[in-house]
Amino acid sequence: MPLPHTPPPAAAGASHGAPASLPGFPPGFAWGVATAAAQIEGDAAGRGRSIWDHFCATPGKVKDGSHIDIACDHVNRHAVDLQLMRWLGVDAYRFSFAWPRLQPLGRGAWHAPGFAFYDRLIDDLLAAGIAPHATLYHWDLPQALQDDMGGWQSRDCAALFADYAAEVARRFGDRLAGLATHNEPWCTATLGYQTGQFAPGLRNRRAAFQVSHHLLLSHGLALQAMRTATRAPLGIVLNHTPPWAAEPSEADRRAARLADGLSTRWYMDPLFLGHYPADVLEHLGADAPQLQAGDLATIGQPMDFLGVNFYTREWLSTRQPPLPAPGALGFSDMGWETHPQSLTRLLLRLSAAYQPPPMLITENGMAHADQLLAGRVDDAARTDYLQRHVDAVAQAMAQGANVAGYFCWSLLDNFEWDSGYAKRFGLVHVDYATQQRTPKDSAHWYRAFIADQRAQRGAAG
Ligand code: IFM
């Protein structure tokens, strides 16, 4: 695939590429891009079925009626995608292992071709000087575990996940710069089991909170199992959408406090403080999860990094009709408000309340209604979004937050879950009919930005 050598006009100017205005990022800070297996890999024949295959095949679940059989055909095109990463100049690549590619039924036999694929991917990344950061679970549960035990509703699923984690750590751990257990367990539990928006599509709050506990338990069990198999840095990736009370009324404040409890504190408290938040337990009443003795100690294993995914804030107004979010910086194609100050605030708040290990911004980016016109995608809005969020990270670091890297979501346009292929988050445009990749203007900006960061590091000696 021919890669452009000079930035197109929109990315060449100083307006989007003003890294010099940023307080410096320290040497060793990793600039990366992120993807996930189900969203890009394709090659359905080379893996077991996952809950997302099943969900896609259920009419009405995915908006454009699409599937993940081919997606970005990354399994067959990973050399091209690696070339794109080299062209971008990234230090690091975050991807996820597809559990059903490594163990098609989620237990029992391992699948040698799956291991061979990730072996190649990791070795090629290392040869290119790109640090591999992997996630064990980015939502593609083997369908067999859903059929046999109701997926994460079963405590047994947590033990099986730990077996899978130990094998992955044994086979790949020493070549990985980071290995996270879960990506966004809030989404797995809440969207998968409470609202039904994501696979497996259940609508049951009690089940969802039991699932959230099993996910956290599986994280703890996996960390214990992996520690004996590898010295790779281990952690978890959580998503945060910081709630803001629309008005200083008691009702809005209460709503914001509960929203924060249901998302951020529900996961951060057990991981770092050894308990679930009392106000949320009270709110859940009989829907609170069943715990067994020792579970919280298992969950609270020491970690080497904390992955933070950030896209937007949650605007909470209890008025009828609700006050709309101000949107001074606009909204993405997902309808998500651009609000970078929330990222600065979040990083400082997490630092103060939890004293986490070094944080990685494991996802940040925006969906934009991109159009490929005459070989170019003008996505100035995405460049602006990225620039502002990188700036927000710098502001937090200047105030003491310990952040070690930033991964843009995503390298490629890809399968955006229940939105199918209709939403585009990539730095690189994908034509799904031809699988042609075209770097967008934002990719040119990111490339120039990373090069500038590297030059600054070099100049600083
Ligand atoms: O595409 C997703 C990703 O899989 C998880 N975090 C949010 C992204 C955008 O919705």
Image: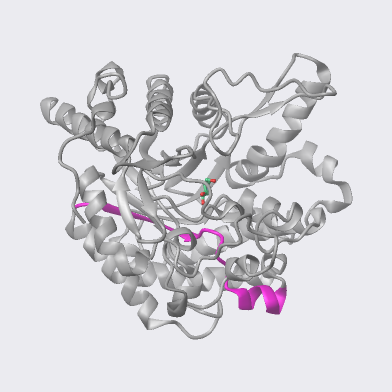
Q: Is residue 53 visible?
A: yes
Quadrant containing the N terminus is bottom left
Q: Is residue 287 left or right of residue 363?
A: right
The residue at the point 43 percent across, 65 percent down is 97
Q: Does residue 422 appear left or right of residue 291 in this picture?
A: left
Residue 290 appears in the figure: no
Give the residue furthest to the front. 374
At 72% from the left and 65% from the top, the residue drawn is 153
- Image quadrant of residue 36? bottom left
Q: Nearer the viewer, residue 232 or 262?
A: 262
In the rendered view, tell whether residue 315 sits above or below residue 212: above
Say above or below: 392 vs 310: above
Q: Is residue 395 above or below residue 210?
A: above
Q: Quadrant of residue 420?
A: bottom right
Residue 261 on the magenta segment = no
Q: Position of residue 316 (x, y in %)?
A: 73, 26
Reply above or below: 270 against 249: below
Colouring convention used in this rendered image of the protein: one colour
Q: Residue at the far bottom: name it.
A: 109
Q: How many marks?
A: 0
Task: Tell me residue 433's x, y (percent).
Answer: 40, 61
> x and y percent of residue 264 in the render?
63, 38
- Image location of residue 27, percent across then percent down: 23, 33
From which residue to which does the magenta span run? 129-149
> Does the magenta run of residues contain 141?
yes
Q: Look at 56% across and 60% down and name the residue there.
A: 139
* Quadrant (top left/top right/bottom left/bottom right) for the C terminus: top left
Q: Residue at x 80, y 15 (%)?
A: 249
- In the shown orientation, is residue 294 left or right of residue 361? right
User: For this rendering, which residue is in front, 164 or 91?
Assistant: 91
- In the image shown, does 9 or 442 lie closer to the viewer? 9
